[in-house]
Image (cartoon, rainbow, N blue to C red):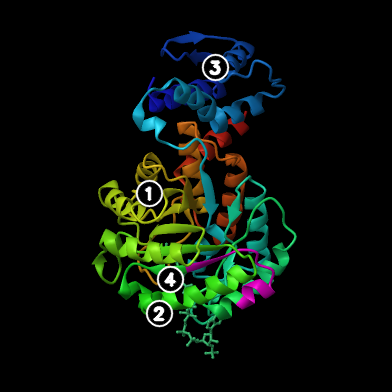
């Protein structure tokens, strides 16, 4: 059965249970009357929870909406002989960029304690990497002027890695002094964006990043490399794949262990992203690549799916879809982590990320910022749980 149909059926099943109509819809679409206990047993068996004790009706109603896709789609994936599925990696590493990419673009400066709490919540959700902040000029990005305080506060946090952005040696040295164990440098595939973002040409930036990489290697500090504007630039328009491949190779050669390809203004579609990835894969091993999509035109998930089908297994995302870039007017947030996890669960791909915990982190930061969620998954699932909690 189609995934969407399954989703619909399961949601219908639970909503009907919530409404206490005691009607259950089976996978074949037939409706039958069941007792509340029967309804739970029916749901439980569909979900493969035969050994699981469900003591509380509310829990029973709440859990499936968050977890059903993993079970069903693991099964679907196993059964599928479809080539499109089989090229998708079995595990995807999610790099959470919300505390950095998300908060750098907020109008009001977020207090350090809120940032630290957000990072803590994200790290405890199973995310392997949470980008914490940037050691950039506070005149350029005042929102992250407290980078040192953030790093000192999270020094002893366990469970995830906490890389930080460093645009030059000054930033690198400050980051290391504050306890950073991993850094990221950020170049651009377009000259116009390089100038507006870091006030220098692409070539000059590569010289600076080479210096950072050399210092980092002496301290055994891993360096991630970003490339912005991989399909389009707010200053120059379309960007050719060969320019992206050129910068990617330079970053790889200077020792970056991973290169994240950023559609900074979210204009890409699979039609432009795939040729760009093909050009980069020609010069950089695919296992070193990550994708970083902003969702300005609603294309991020399709672009991620296309990237996974090409064999990429690292995806950047931002809790609740926070973000944008201060030097890319009109760019919306990154793809929401909740939406990525939901899709990967649906594909039977492991992430080790607890969707419910990510949603809690999203609620936490959204409440503080006073925005509504940028995650469709978080909005949909919170409607279902809110409904269930009224029982
Ligand atoms: C690169 C610079 C510093 C050049 O800035 P500049 O003004 O050309 O640099 P400068 O060397 O002339 O220094 C000017 C002042 O900044 C100070 N300074 C210099 N470096 C640092 C530093 N590291 N930390 C703290 N202070 C620093 C320096 O000490 C001096 O202070 P002053 O003497 O005027 O008091 C500046 O342009 C900058 O900080 N840019 C950062 C922009 C930024 O953070 N953009 C957002 C991140 S990129 C992004 O979001 C894209 C990404 C990664 O997510 C992927 C995607 O979506 O595409």
Residue annotated with mark 4: 326
Element class at badge 4: loop
Looking at the picture, tell me which residue is in the foreground, 114 or 243. Answer: 243
Q: Earlier in the sequence, mark 3 or mark 2?
A: 3
Mark 4 lies within 8 Å of ligand 1 (Cβ measured): yes
Write the residue at 31% across / 74% down: 191
- 3D distance between C-alphas at marks 2 and 4: 21 Å
The N terminus, quarter of image = top left
Q: In the image, which disc is placed on residue 46?
A: 3
- In the rendered view, tell whether residue 12 sits above or below residue 131: above
- 3D distance between C-alphas at marks 1 and 2: 30 Å
- 3D distance between C-alphas at marks 4 and 1: 19 Å
- Numbered disc in front, either 3 or 2: 2
Q: Position of residue 244 (x, y in %)?
A: 33, 62
Residue annotated with mark 2: 204
Write the residue at 39% across / 35% down: 87
- 3D distance between C-alphas at marks 3 and 1: 31 Å
Q: In the image, which disc is placed on residue 300?
A: 1
Q: Earlier in the sequence, mark 2 or mark 4?
A: 2
Any part of residue 324 in sight: no
Q: Position of residue 390 (x, y in %)?
A: 61, 32
- 3D distance between C-alphas at marks 4 and 3: 47 Å
Element class at badge 3: helix
Q: Badge 4 local density, few (<14 within 10 Å), some, or many (20+)?
A: some
Horizontal relation, residue 199 to residue 35: left or right? left
- 3D distance between C-alphas at marks 3 and 2: 58 Å
Q: In the image, which disc is placed on residue 37?
A: none
């Amino acid at each position: 059965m189609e995934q969407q149909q399954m989703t619909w059926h399961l949601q219908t099943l639970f909503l009907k249970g919530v409404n206490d109509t005691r009607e259950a819809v089976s996978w074949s679409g037939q409706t039958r009357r069941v007792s509340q206990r029967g309804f739970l047993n029916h749901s439980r068996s569909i979900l493969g929870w035969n050994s699981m004790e469900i003591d509380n009706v509310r829990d029973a109603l709440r859990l499936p909406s968050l977890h059903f896709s993993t079970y069903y789609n693991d099964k679907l994936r196993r059964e599928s002989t479809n080539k499109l599925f089989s090229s998708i990696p079995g595990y995807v590493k999610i790099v959470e960029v919300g505390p950095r990419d998300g908060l750098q673009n907020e109008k009001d400066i977020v207090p350090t304690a809120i940032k630290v709490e957000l990072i803590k919540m994200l790290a405890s959700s199973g995310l392997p990497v949470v980008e914490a902040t940037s050691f950039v000029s506070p005149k350029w990005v005042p929102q992250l002027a407290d980078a040192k305080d953030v790093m000192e506060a999270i020094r002893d946090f366990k469970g995830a890695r906490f890389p930080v952005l460093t645009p030059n040696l000054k930033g690198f040295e400050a980051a290391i002094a504050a306890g950073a164990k991993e850094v990221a440098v950020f170049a651009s595939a377009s000259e116009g964006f390089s100038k507006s973002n870091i006030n220098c040409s692409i070539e000059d930036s590569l010289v600076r990043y080479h210096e950072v990489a050399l210092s980092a290697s002496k301290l055994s500090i891993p360096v991630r490399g970003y490339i912005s504007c991989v399909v389009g630039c707010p200053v120059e328009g379309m960007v050719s794949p060969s320019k992206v491949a050129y910068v990617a190779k330079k970053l790889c050669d200077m020792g970056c262990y991973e290169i994240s390809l950023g559609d900074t203004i979210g204009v890409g579609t699979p039609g432009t992203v795939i040729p760009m990835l093909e050009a980069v894969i020609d010069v950089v091993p695919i296992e070193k690549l990550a994708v970083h999509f902003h969702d300005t035109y609603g294309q991020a998930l399709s672009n991620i799916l296309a990237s996974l089908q090409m064999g990429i297994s690292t995806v950047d995302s931002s809790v609740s879809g926070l973000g944008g870039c201060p030097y890319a007017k009109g760019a919306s947030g990154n793809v929401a982590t909740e939406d990525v996890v939901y899709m990967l669960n649906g594909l039977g791909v492991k992430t080790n990320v607890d969707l419910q915990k990510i949603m809690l982190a999203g609620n936490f930061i959204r409440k503080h910022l006073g925005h509504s969620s940028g995650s469709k998954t978080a909005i949909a699932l919170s409607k279902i749980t809110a409904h269930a909690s009224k029982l």
